[in-house]
Amino acid sequence: SLCIDKNFEQNIKTLLSNQPVDGVLLVATDMDEADVRIVQKIESHVVILDACYDRLDANCVVMDNYLGGTLAAQYFIRQGHKRIGYIQSQIRIYNFEKRKLGFIDELRRNGIEVAPDDILEVDSSIEGSYEMLQQRAFGGPDRPTCYFAENDYMAIGLLRALQQKGISVPEEVAVIGFDNIDMAAIVTPGLTSINVPKGKLAEICISQLMFMLKHDHFS
């Protein structure tokens, strides 16, 4: 794996010179626009997975994050929740922003607002989010009865923090994550999560890359 740092461009050049390729499938979840431009400058056939950039001319394949956020909101609404909380990452990326927008928009369409104090900003890892959330007081009758987290790692960190405080999930506080990682099924209690069709996304990426290569070959 390559670390996104000042040596990124040279690392990419070295990798592609040692392993010549016809195209690149770039998993760009945490990459910014400048880093993607570097890859595009070195290799013309690039398909980007799990990220999207408004100002970049690029072939991107990404899940419907807005719909995922909408589905999470609909689930809470069907369960009768009125005081709803949100767990967001300190680092803002395209996927997280779209998930938040879909979630907030759907709640507003149903007359529900998320109070600013109920939006908790944490590290996006399990340990980091747990350490930050365990410092927060979740007690009292006026607390949210549910939380939507932007990814499963933050959701699991929240589960641990709630359990440490003796708050039962989902009986007292419901939690929904996003990505449906393998760990979501083995934590206790099991985590409800928005599923991402990873296999389908990979198939689309490969199909797009093959199309680019074929189109370039016959042009």
Image: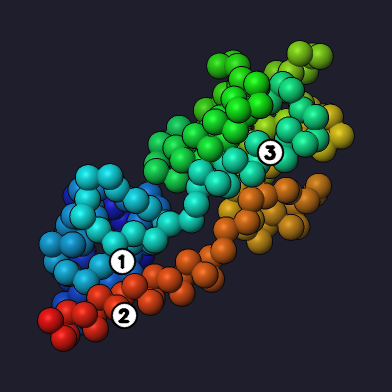
Q: Amino acid at mark 3?
A: Gln
Q: Residues within 10 Å of mark 2 (few under 14, many from 20)?
A: some
Mark 1 or mark 3, which is nearer the start of the sequence? Answer: 1
Q: Amino acid at mark 2?
A: Met
The answer to whether residue 99 is visible is yes
Element type where label 3 sits in the image: helix
Q: Nearer the viewer, residue 60 or 184?
A: 60
Q: Residues within 10 Å of mark 3 (few under 14, many from 20)?
A: some
Q: Nearer the viewer, residue 18 or 98?
A: 98
Dot label at residue 210: 2
Where residue 91 sits: x, y (%)? Answer: 41, 36
Which residue is tagged 1? 47
Q: Is residue 92 left or right of residue 101?
A: left
The residue positioned farthest toward the bottom in the image shown: 218
Dot label at residue 74: 3
- The quadrant the C terminus occupies is bottom left
Mark 3 or mark 2, which is nearer the start of the sequence? Answer: 3
The answer to whether residue 5 is visible is no
98 relative to 59, above or below: above
Element type where label 1 sits in the image: strand
Q: Amino acid at mark 1?
A: Val
From the image, state whether disc 3 or disc 1 is nearer to you.
3
In space, the residues marked 3 and 1 are separated at their CA atoms by: 32 Å
Where residue 200 sits: x, y (%)? Answer: 52, 70
Element type where label 2 sits in the image: helix
